[in-house]
Image: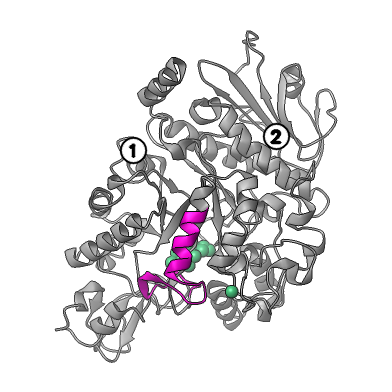
Amino acid sequence: MVRENMVQAEKKKIGFEKWWQNAVIYQIYPRSFQDSNGDGIGDLQGIISRLDYLGTLGVDAIWLSPVCRSPQDDNGYDISDYQDIDPMFGTLKDMEELISEAGKRGIRIIMDLVLNHTSDEHPWFVEAKSGRENPYHDYYVWRDGDPKTPPNDMKAGFGGSAWEWSPEAGQYYFHQFSAKQPDLNWDNPKVRQEIYQMIRWWMEKGVGGFRLDVIDQIAKVPDERITNNGPMLHTYIRELSRETFQKGDLVTVGEAWGATPDLARLYSSPDGTEFSMVFQFEHILLDQQEGKEKWDLAPLPFLKLKEIFNQWQTSLYQCGWNSLFWDNHDLPRIVSRWGDDKRYRTESAKMLATLLHGMQGTPYIYQGEELGMTNVRYSIEEYRDIETLNLYRERMEAGYEKEDVMASVYAKSRDNARTPMQWDNGIHAGFTDGIPWMKVNPNYQEIHAAAQVGVPGSVFEYYRRLVALRKEYPVLTDGRFLMLMEKDEQVFSYLRENDQCRMLVICNFFGNPVECALAEEWDQEILLIGNYEDREAGVLKPYEARMYLEKAGNNRETVL
Ligand code: TEU
Ligand code: CA
């Protein structure tokens, strides 16, 4: 008992006592996870039926992409009622059952809060557009003008102008995403108070945390073309946190495409005044042409990737907290993107997982990532995502070659992550016994959970071990990160150390074998996990990954 108290006291001193600092979080895209009623769309009862699978994986929390009422223009990121569940996913009772059933397995439920905008079918907007005198009018961002000349040339995230003319209101309204997603006016204190009341309502239902959609865009100043990092941003975030999150023991993660390490020290300050952490995207933006869009492909600059991870790991050490992710519902699947989804699919999936899960922060596993699920190459008619379909239409109208546009879609479409979860080799991969809302990846016969759970050597069992290691070794939570071999063009290696022990993570990031003295040097230490049965002295095989624990007392002198 004394030792446990001492360890807790030690953690408190350097700020590692939060449950989510030793947690692994699993993201579910409900529409594609498990259908329970044969309508071809995933739902809450489907998730409940798969909780034991997630318990086996060992995750501590589940982040649900939005399940609130929505016309589904952007697959639920256009909310029309924040306090009701969309019938396609189930009911509030189903949500309460999910929170309770997950809780029995030690799993918290994290909801996705879309606070930058609502659906244009939200009652607030229906009222707001009815006229300037309406008390809800200022819940949104309106500008005068003539129907043919938008207030300025700002563009929306899904193509076209960021200004939409409302004939009813006789004004333009601002939308950073689709025209069916009008931006909320956070400068209006009534908007903020309505939002805080809604969040507290979900907290009372036992929700264990929140993911905050595009939260760094809420303090927009359209007249100055400011979208993210607006002047009032941290004022609003601190008020939001004070009025809601700080009243519970929640994990909160803000989506911040414009985050830098300096800003992240504010967002994830250990004083708890803003969020637990943010999703930052510097590594995600690397394989696109400078100053262009994600569709304008470029090879991954490997040394830059190492530099960015090194910067984020060292910048937030003991003064903030990192999220750790490769995949989410907006991103292509990492094994296809930066691994090899053909010849070395399982090796590269495991290598990428080792690299990420050895770092300091909270790792996120996106549904199917733990199976090594891959991107797809569909005909354009088989895609569903508004962003992809708008891109295709815009670039074909602009005269791009179809094969170039499709190459961009294959590489970066958000639908790569949204094909149905592959459970078994039955019809539609066990996702539904109806017609799936989107085609199942044809490779489900080879890649599915039933062939991996409990099967030694599978990607699933590898992820399960990585999750367990985080529980077993506090150094993975509190250890300092030290990058090694910074200039090496093929190997990604780093140390984790605290005053109890040291670990080495060493990965060959590519598909050709490489000689590596450091791997040989550490091969006399304890191998905690690796993605090859046999190791060759001094050589890392294609996509080979190893995590070593230094034997007590060895204190080898490793050149940093
Ligand atoms: O995404 C924010 C966002 O900017 C992404 O749309 C990103 O720009 C794009 O996916 C890159 O290709 C959040 C949600 O994660 C996304 O699903 C929503 O579509 C978007 O906000 C609007 O709510
Ligand atoms: Ca369903």
Q: Which callout, 2 or 1, points at the residue further toward the start of the chain?
A: 1
Residue hosting label 1: 269
Name the quarter where the N terminus is drawn.
top left
Name the quarter where the C terminus is drawn.
top right
Closer to viewer: mark 2 or mark 1: 1
Left or right position of 134 against 91: left
Q: Which numbered tag is attached to residue 10?
A: none
Binning the other alpha carbons within 10 Å of mark 1 as few (below 14), some (14 to 19) or many (20 upward) gives some
**Frontmost residue, 1 versus 509:** 1
- In the image, residue 406 sits, relative to residue 310, either above or below, namely below
Which amino acid type is marked by label 1?
Answer: Ser
SS type, badge 1: loop
Q: Is residue 281 visible?
A: no
Residue hosting label 2: 507
Q: Distance between the residues labelled 2 and 1?
A: 31 Å
Quadrant housing residue 269: top left
Q: Which residue is drawn at 64% across and 77% down?
A: 38
For the magenta stretch, what is the residue range?
74-101
Q: Can residue 436 be seen in this view?
A: yes
Binning the other alpha carbons within 10 Å of mark 2 as few (below 14), some (14 to 19) or many (20 upward) gives many
Q: Which residue lies furthest to the bottom in this view?
A: 167
- In the image, residue 280 sits, relative to residue 155, either above or below, namely above
Q: Residue furthest top?
A: 553
Task: Locate ligand 2 by image quadrant.
Answer: bottom right
Q: Position of residue 262 (x, y in %)?
A: 36, 40
Q: Which residue is drawn at 28% across and 42% down?
A: 273
Quadrant housing residue 356: top right
Q: Where is residue 492 in the image (x, y as percent from the top left)?
A: 66, 34
SS type, badge 2: strand
Q: Which residue is drawn at 51% across and 45% down?
A: 106
Q: Which residue is drawn at 40% across and 79% down?
A: 180
Q: Where is residue 12 in the image (x, y as percent from the top left)?
A: 37, 26
